[in-house]
């Protein structure tokens, strides 16, 4: 039985690595194939990830590139259809919530090919987020839904998904984190390589920003960068720049807000990002995945959004939702600096074995030979 696995954007790669490995470990009965849609194409954003994570080279590259949501989604669909016909898999497996996820799920569902969704059921209840739309629709199209936290099941049941399709298996991204933690690149080395030896030696904060709601609005982006500059006067800030964010900083003429004592970096590889998060005093982010990774690492996280689709990182983990008002962000930062941040605990099943559970369930679910 061939399983056609889809990756498109950076956060997909680390989720797919353990799934491909666990499916391969089932033996000759199951044959995973990898398609890369090319939603992300920069070397810095993807080839490095494939190499660092030991993901096999994709069997199929669709090379769709960037575009508006409609263009990008449509282009993935158009190019994925012949690939699906050629491979004729028993199922299509998608992860996460990017445009490639919904595009391939929709093509498969309409062709009667079963869809498996890993990281199902997460909801921010904010339809202004393109990912929320991708999540809701992908789950509606899926035959087998794997969740990372139990909130996912409750959300899916409310949307009419049958209980027996839903399996709580834990978090494949944390499988990858645990496997790779021993190889994490220390922050001191990253600073030295960037020509800023000693920058991180007395503690530092990490900042990541890329959500359109934060970076595509000039006033909002300016406020966030000013807040980061204020924090950097007390705690040096390491700021790996997503290409979307780099472009809007330039377009809005905000580069002057990024002078020292901040350290700007190009998009980092997976092992570099792990090292940066592991040793940080605090991480400020609008990413979804980083909220989970910091919870797994026990590093305090301040989320620069008004909501999260990953509530367990707040209920059990180290995450604080601070929104994007400077006063609230600075208050959350103060709390971490004076109180050390939330202690947090690692959620159930975030134990490095989620992909094994997925593979076992997929194996049982496939038709008997
Ligand atoms: C996408 C995902 C988002 C995810 C993020 C992680 C959707 C709707 N969004 O957002 O959920 O958190 O990836 O990075 O799928 N660009 C490059 N090089 C690349 C790719 C993109 O320079 O390899 C630039 C282009 O200018 C492009 C912009 O980044 O227009 C945005 O890329 P896109 O894939 O549309 O969305 P992301 O913001 O990366």
Image (cartoon, grey):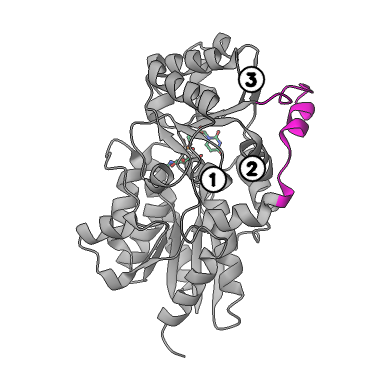
Labelled pair 1, 3 in contact (Cβ < 8 Å): no
| Residue 297 image position (x, y, % from top left) | 58, 45
SS state under label 3:
loop
Of the image marks 2 and 3, the number of the one nearer the N terminus: 3
Of 181 and 13, the residue lying toward us:
181
- Picture quadrant where residue 71 is located: top left
The residue carrying mark 1 has its beta carbon less than 8 Å from ligand 1: no
Q: Residue at x 35, y 51 (%)?
A: 122
Classed neighbour count for the residue bearing mark 1: other residues with Cα under 10 Å, few (<14), some (14–19), many (≥20): many
The residue carrying mark 2 has its beta carbon less than 8 Å from ligand 1: no
- Picture quadrant where residue 207 is located: top right
Q: Which residues are magenta?
A: 182-203
Q: Residue at x 64, y 59 (%)?
A: 55
Q: Which residue is mark 1?
A: 293
Q: Is residue 225 above or below residue 69?
A: above
Of the image marks 2 and 1, the number of the one nearer the N terminus: 2
Of 126 and 212, the residue lying toward us:
126
Labelled pair 2, 1 in contact (Cβ < 8 Å): yes
Q: Which residue is mark 3?
A: 236
| Residue 318 image position (x, y, % from top left) | 48, 40
């Amino acid at each position: 039985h061939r399983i056609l696995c889809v990756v498109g954007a950076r956060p997909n790669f680390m989720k797919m690595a353990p799934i491909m490995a666990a499916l391969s470990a089932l033996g000759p009965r199951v044959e995973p194939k990898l398609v890369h849609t090319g939603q992300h194409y920069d070397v810095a954003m993807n080839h490095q990830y494939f190499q660092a994570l030991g993901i096999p080279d994709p069997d199929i590259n669709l090379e769709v590139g960037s575009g508006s949501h409609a263009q990008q989604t449509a282009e993935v669909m158009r190019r994925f259809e012949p690939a699906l016909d050629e491979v004729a898999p028993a199922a299509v497996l998608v992860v996460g919530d990017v445009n490639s996820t919904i595009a391939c799920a929709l093509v498969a569902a309409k062709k009667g090919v079963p869809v498996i969704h890993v990281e199902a059921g997460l909801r921010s209840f904010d339809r202004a987020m393109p990912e929320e739309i991708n999540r809701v629709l992908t789950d509606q199209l899926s035959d087998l839904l794997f969740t990372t936290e139990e909130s996912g099941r409750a959300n899916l049941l409310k949307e009419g998904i049958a209980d027996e399709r839903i399996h709580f298996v834990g978090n494949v991204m944390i499988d990858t984190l645990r496997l790779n933690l021993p190889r994490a690149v220390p922050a001191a080395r990253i600073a030295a390589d960037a020509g800023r030896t000693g920058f991180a030696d007395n503690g530092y904060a990490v900042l990541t920003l890329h959500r359109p709601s934060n970076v595509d609005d000039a006033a909002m982006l300016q406020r966030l960068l000013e807040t980061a500059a204020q924090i950097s006067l007390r705690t040096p800030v390491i700021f790996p720049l997503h290409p979307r964010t780099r472009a809007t900083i330039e377009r809005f003429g905000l580069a002057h807000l990024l002078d020292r004592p901040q350290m700007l970096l190009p998009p980092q590889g997976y092992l570099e990002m792990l090292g940066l998060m592991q040793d940080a005093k605090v991480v400020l982010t609008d990413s979804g995945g980083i909220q989970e990774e910091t919870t797994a690492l026990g590093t305090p996280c301040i989320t620069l959004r008004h909501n999260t689709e990953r509530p367990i990182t707040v209920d059990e983990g180290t995450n604080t939702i601070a929104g994007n008002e400077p006063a609230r962000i600075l208050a959350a930062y103060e709390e971490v600096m004076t109180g050390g941040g939330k202690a947090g605990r690692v959620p159930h099943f975030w134990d490095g074995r989620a992909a094994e559970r997925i593979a076992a369930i997929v194996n049982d679910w496939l038709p008997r030979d």
